[in-house]
Image (cartoon, grey):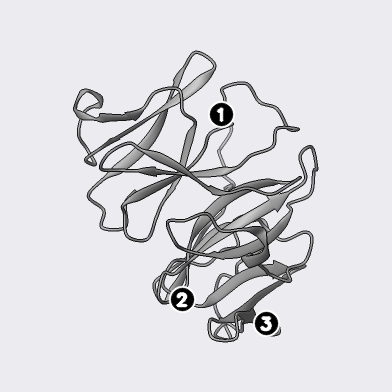
Amino acid sequence: MSPDGRQIAYSVPEGDTFSIRIGEPGAGVGAARVLCKGCGYAREFSADGRFLLYLPEETTKLDSKRKYTVRLLEVASGKDRPWLEHPSDSVEPWGVFGEDRGWVTIRVVPPGSRNSGITHIVPWREQPVPPSEWIPVNLPPDNSPYSHSPGNSNFLYFFQGPKFMATRFDPQARRFGEPFEVKFVPGSPVAIQPEDSWAVRGPGLVFARKENHSSVWLMKLPE
């Protein structure tokens, strides 16, 4: 979904590859415009909505050892250009970051690795950004891959064991502060757990979990 909510981009399998289409939310597939054929998998819009961040190496056949790079696809013209590439590791974008929406959260993972990789933030610009400008975030190795904050905050949230934590980014110093525990209002009827599906939205936290309910019935037996 584009930042203004007016466009939605999605990938369509075509043989072993994906094509990328874009259209208005709620419109039929026939109304969508083909941005590129057999080009890769769409992941994120840029903060200004002018570009799509996509993975050109992605195919319909899963391969844990595949090395990913990130390219930019211009929404207006369909032209693409290189953006992020690591000499040895795989790179995947996760979302727009920062109060000024001037950064992008990425994960850098060695191909074939089972760990969640290292989170970085990358300054947004249309030209390629070399790894020397990627800023690593000191997160615990078991943090959730969905721990990035939304694109309206300089805070990044994550779990460290059972504790819900946050760290604040200083764009002037280009570094993160020391992590601290997020305290909730005492007596809250429900508390978030590491295994919950969650996201930061506006001033609050939205999360979902599976709950099992059971009941006991008493039935009189026939005499």
At label 1, the amino acid type is Pro
At label 2, the amino acid type is Ser
Quickly name the residue at label 2.
153
- Foreground residue among 128 and 103: 128
**Could you classify mark 1 by the number of other residues whose Cα lies within 10 Å: few (under 14), some (14-19), or many (20 or more)?**
few
| Real-space Cα separation, disc 2 to disc 1, in angstroms | 65 Å
Quickly name the residue at label 3.
181
Residue 40 percent across, percent down from the top left: 49, 31
| Real-space Cα separation, disc 3 to disc 1, in angstroms | 59 Å
What is the quadrant of residue 177 in the picture?
Answer: bottom right
Instruction: Name which residue lies at 55% across and 38% down.
Output: 219
Task: Tell me the SS state at disc 2.
Answer: loop
Task: Tell me the SS state at disc 3.
Answer: strand
Instruction: Name which residue lies at 32% across and 36% down.
Output: 78
User: Which tag is nearer the camera, tag 3 or tag 2?
Assistant: 2
Q: N-terminal of the two: label 3 or label 2? A: 2
At label 3, the amino acid type is Glu
Q: N-terminal of the two: label 2 or label 1? A: 2
Residue 102 percent across, percent down from the top left: 44, 69
Vertical position of residue 135 compared to residue 208: above or below: below
Quickly name the residue at label 1.
222
* Residue 109 relative to residue 122: left or right: right
Instruction: Name which residue lies at 60% across and 67% down.
Output: 192
Q: N-terminal of the two: label 3 or label 1? A: 3
